[in-house]
Image (cartoon, grey):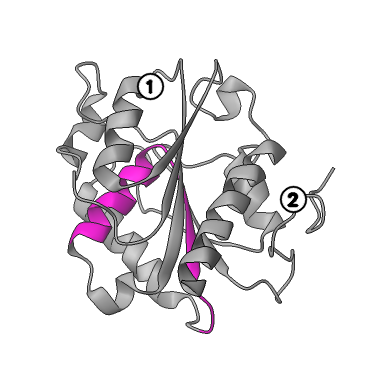
Amino acid sequence: MLPTAASIESPIALNSKAPYHFLVVPGWHGSEVDHWQSHWTAQLQAYRVEQRDWHQPDRLQWVDTFEATLREIPDDRPVILIGHSLGCITIAHWALDAAPALRARVAGALLVAPADVERPDCPEPLQNFAPIPHQPLPFPVHVVASTNDPAATAQRALALSRFWGAELDVLAGVGHLNVASGHHQWEAGYEFLNHLMRRIEQRLAA
């Protein structure tokens, strides 16, 4: 069932009146049609980063494409980033060097199953994304990780969350939170997005 604004108890309206723009940032190989990021793109009427090469990712090119997509989003509303896997690392690299005025357009980021590109068995195409930035990200961040994610241990997810100044939820036995681990609509994920938005609202009200 499609989540409604009431069922997720958030200011997300699944129409043009939403208080935020959303930018979906897929990881390695992109997010196929049944991936939760694809469902969320439709449900939230989100923008989405489309990389030139999903299979041989180049860090500089991915960061540039992310920034170009962000610049295309109208500036009438703040932007919330929704990253998965290598998309999370792309966001971290972008935030390190982005112009302050452009960074200020980002209200927050939900980073799901960030890929540890420094792990010993990291696939060769991803290794140019190392080292992972260790600086705090300049906006509220919520990381969702797993106890059995092959792309990052729970311990590494905790370390990355601390580096980035993020809140962290570690879920038991949910794998890489992708189609292969059974996550399609992933309606439960809206709980984390909703929590992030409450944090953003509290920050703006302070």
Quarter placement of the N terminus: top right
- Determine whether 106 is above or below 112 in the image: below
Residue nearest the observer in this picture, 123 or 158? 158
> Residue 98's x, y, as percent?
23, 67
From the viewer's perspective, tell me whether residue 10 is left or right of residue 59. Answer: right
Name the residue tied to disc 1.
154
Q: Position of residue 109 (x, y in %)?
A: 44, 54
The reply to whether residue 56 is visible in this rendering is: no
Can you tell which mark lies on residue 8? 2
> How far from the left and from the top, in percent, is residue 49?
45, 57
The CA span between labels 2 and 1 is: 27 Å
Tell whether 106 sits left or right of 134. right
How packed mark 1 is, by other alpha carbons closer than 10 Å (few <14, some 14-19, many 20 or more), is many
Within the magenta stretch, is there residue 78? yes
Q: Looking at numbered disc 2 in the image, what kind of residue is underneath it?
A: Ile
The residue that appears at 22% across and 74% down in the rendered structure is 99
Question: x, y (%) of residue 42?
Answer: 68, 56
Please provide the residue range marked out in magenta: 76-96
